[in-house]
Image (tube, rainbow, N blue to C red):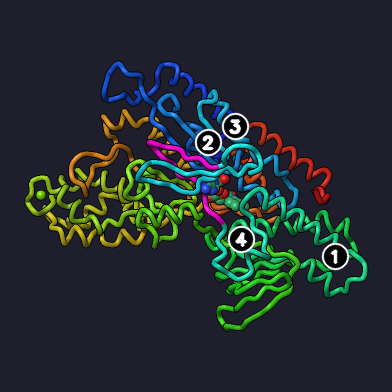
């Protein structure tokens, strides 16, 4: 058990972490490659003597996906430009800690120009928002959000050869009435800072003279809509902040504080293992945090929240002092408009293929929360696969013919592997059941054997883990673009017929997920279906989140914030 614990810890730290130590090693390697000419650059086709022209790579965003892409990109081959309205990278998993001052806002951000500077200024950064993507003319239109009164035009356009869209997502309010006006969100660093100020405001307001007890109770009723990891972590942080720090400085109202979590599903943390949901629900019950499952919020006003019990249809209104809305992600306007342009207008998120390319477009990639990988269904391509595999055109597949393609099929349709894993089978078991003593199988038998695997197709979650892995995958593809054009290393093409794909498709590796539950307790789902809960898991959380910081500077700041909180408690000044 102990060995397994440490091996999981090692895997998590080694694989997912963006440690500064590994950054500097990679940087040295990149410098070495750049110094020796790196990967072959794009040559002007008109003249071999003409200077080599670098391909223009334009990156939209400075979040998880974009910085992970930029971190390892070999810029000796490309002219790289970055556009984002935020001139910093934010370590979002620590935002709930920022809401209550456990960690300071500046400890979780890294200026993007530090990342740019590391590249000797060769990556250009523009602090602006991309408003429109024109994929036909390979151009984007941007507007700077810096003071309009300063001289100069705030709008500009940029051309690209390759575009990497990594603009993330925005909060999804499901068009619920009053949410935008009366709720706090927890998506950006500014949101976390404004929640921190609002919580302290509520306490200062509640202790003012001449308020009734009812009014004080209402002011101190904190409601969290959404029982996913972010909402639950915030509820736990808030509970700790109130009970460890605020009740000591506002003793007169300590019994009037209440925290309610509203969740439309039947359980909180329902993307986690059932044991974790149950553990979290029991812990919240002990802590006095009310959890209302099976309730859908219908509307919000400045004083009340209206909801409906899904089982009974009963409508309920509760008074609140503050609401934090945390119910998943929605599409940004620039992406909506782009989706309309490219015929994806009926979709919720931008569809990409297994090479992170926007479906149907050659030079435009999308990674992170703004995109979703549409896993191809094997049954849609089954005839092409069969035709490609049947090399002797006999109309049937021999076992050798099948064995020759199965590896390429599995690479492109990972649902086969998931299916086999779920049934505890391997490829030879699949072969045995398909051939069942016979020498050849026809298309019907082939279809029948694989018809069940598509049930295993899943879309990837909108997490930093997925975004960072996609960014790293894509930079690796870009770094080897020329090499792989000449020697494709991807699987055999089935639909378009003939040849191989340039690269192996993106494959997500789930490294586990955490849910901090307050009171120095956390729950975690770790690789190998291992579930861990309690104090030791909280220490594992501390070590992993410290190791995953983007720089030594932020790592030290975060650790010192944790120590400060431990010694002095959280700061309750409203600044
Ligand atoms: P983001 O990181 O959101 O970055 C988007 C970037 O695009 C930003 O720099 C933004 O400024 C920029 N941008 C926006 N609009 C434009 C535009 N029009 N033009 C140009 N640039 C633009 N995931 C985990 O795996 N583990 C966790 O513990 C975890 N905890 C979380 C806690 C909170 C509070 C939140 C909000 C999220 C958490 N997540 C976690 C999810 C994770 O943060 C996201 O999945 C991740 O940020 C997605 O990365 P991204 O690069 O797609 O988007
Ligand atoms: Mg044959």
Q: Nearer the viewer, mark 2 or mark 1?
A: 1
Q: What residue is pinned by disc 3?
A: 113
The CA span between labels 2 and 3 is: 26 Å
Q: Are marks 4 and 3 in contact (CB under 8 Å)?
A: no
Left or right position of 24 against 438: right
Find residue 233 and report its horizontal and vertical position in percent. 65, 56
- Asked whether the residues under the numbered discs 1 and 4 touch, taking CB atoms below 8 Å apart as contact, a structural biologist would say no
Name which residue lies at 72% across and 55% down. 195
Q: Residue at x 57, y 70 (%)?
A: 264
Q: Which residues are magenta?
A: 155-170
| Nearer to the camera, 546 or 528 | 546
- Which is more foreground, mark 2 or mark 4? 4
Disc with the residue nearer the chain's start (2 vs 4): 2
Q: Which residue is label 2 attached to?
A: 14
Mark 3 neighbour density, 10 Å: few (under 14) some (14–19) many (20 or more) = some
Q: Position of residue 303 (x, y in %)?
A: 73, 72
User: Mark 4 = which residue?
Assistant: 326
Q: Nearer the viewer, residue 423 or 218?
A: 218
Could one spot residue 328 in this view of the protein? yes
- Measured in 3D between alpha carbons, the distance from the residue under mark 2 to the one under mark 4, in whole angstroms, is 31 Å
Residue 450, quarter of picture: bottom left
User: Is residue 169 inside the magenta stretch?
Assistant: yes
The secondary structure type at the circle numbered 3 is helix
Q: CA distance from mark 1 to mark 4?
A: 25 Å
User: Which mark is on residue 206?
Assistant: 1
Task: Tell me the quarter of the picture where residue 20 sits.
Answer: top right
Q: Any mark on residue 450, and which?
A: none
């Amino acid at each position: 058990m102990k060995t397994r614990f440490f091996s999981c810890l090692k895997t998590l730290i080694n694989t997912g972490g963006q440690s500064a130590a590994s950054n500097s090693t990679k940087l040295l390697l990149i410098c070495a490659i750049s110094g020796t000419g790196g990967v072959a650059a794009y040559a002007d086709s008109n003249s071999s003597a003409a200077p080599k022209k670098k391909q223009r790579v334009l990156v939209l965003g400075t979040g998880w996906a974009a910085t992970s892409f930029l971190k390892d990109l070999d810029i000796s081959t490309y002219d790289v430009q970055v556009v984002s309205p935020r001139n910093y990278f934010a370590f979002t998993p620590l935002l709930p800690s920022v809401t209550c001052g456990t960690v300071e806002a500046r400890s979780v951000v890294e200026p993007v120009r530090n990342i740019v500077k590391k590249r000797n200024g060769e990556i250009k950064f523009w602090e602006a928002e991309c408003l429109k993507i024109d994929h036909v003319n390979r151009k984007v239109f941007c507007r700077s959000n810096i003071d309009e009164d300063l001289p100069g035009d705030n709008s500009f356009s940029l051309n690209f050869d390759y575009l990497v869209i990594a603009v993330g997502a925005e909060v999804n309010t499901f068009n619920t009435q009053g949410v935008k006006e009366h709720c706090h969100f927890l998506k950006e660093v500014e949101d976390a800072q404004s929640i921190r100020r609002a919580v302290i405001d509520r306490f200062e307001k509640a202790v003012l003279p001449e308020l009734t007890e009812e009014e004080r109770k209402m002011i101190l009723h904190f409601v969290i809509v959404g029982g996913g990891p972010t909402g639950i972590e915030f509820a736990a942080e808030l509970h700790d902040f109130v009970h460890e720090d605020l009740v000591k400085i506002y003793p007169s109202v300590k019994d009037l504080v209440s925290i309610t979590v509203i969740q439309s599903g039947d359980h909180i943390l329902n993307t986690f293992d059932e044991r974790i949901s149950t553990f979290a629900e029991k812990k919240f019950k002990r802590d006095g945090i009310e959890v209302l499952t099976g309730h859908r919020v219908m509307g919000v006003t400045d004083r009340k929240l209206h909801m409906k019990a899904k089982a009974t249809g009963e409508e309920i209104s509760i008074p609140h002092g503050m609401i934090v809305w945390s119910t998943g992600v929605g599409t940004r306007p620039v992406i909506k408009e782009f989706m309309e342009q490219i015929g994806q207008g009926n979709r919720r998120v931008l569809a990409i293929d297994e090479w992170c390319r926007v479906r149907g477009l050659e030079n435009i990639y999308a990674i992170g929360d703004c995109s979703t990988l549409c896993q191809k269904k094997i049954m849609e391509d089954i005839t092409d696969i069969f035709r490609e595999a049947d090399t002797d055109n006999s109309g049937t597949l021999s076992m050798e013919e099948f064995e020759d393609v199965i590896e390429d099929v599995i690479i492109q349709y990972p649902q086969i592997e998931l299916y086999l894993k779920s049934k505890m089978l391997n490829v030879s078991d699949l072969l045995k059941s398909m051939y069942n003593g016979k020498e050849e199988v026809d298309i019907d038998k082939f279809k029948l054997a694989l018809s069940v695997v598509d049930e295993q197709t899943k879309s990837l979650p909108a997490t930093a883990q997925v975004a960072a892995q996609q960014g790293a995958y894509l930079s690796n593809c870009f770094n080897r673009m020329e090499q792989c054009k000449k020697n494709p290393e991807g699987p055999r093409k089935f639909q378009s017929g003939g040849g191989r794909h340039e690269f192996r498709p993106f494959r997500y590796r789930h490294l586990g997920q955490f849910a901090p539950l307050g009171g120095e307790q956390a729950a975690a789902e770790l690789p190998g279906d291992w579930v861990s809960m309690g104090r030791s898991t909280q220490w594992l959380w501390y070590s992993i989140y410290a190791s995953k910081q983007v720089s030594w500077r932020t790592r030290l700041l975060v650790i010192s914030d944790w120590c400060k909180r431990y010694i002095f408690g959280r700061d309750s000044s409203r600044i």
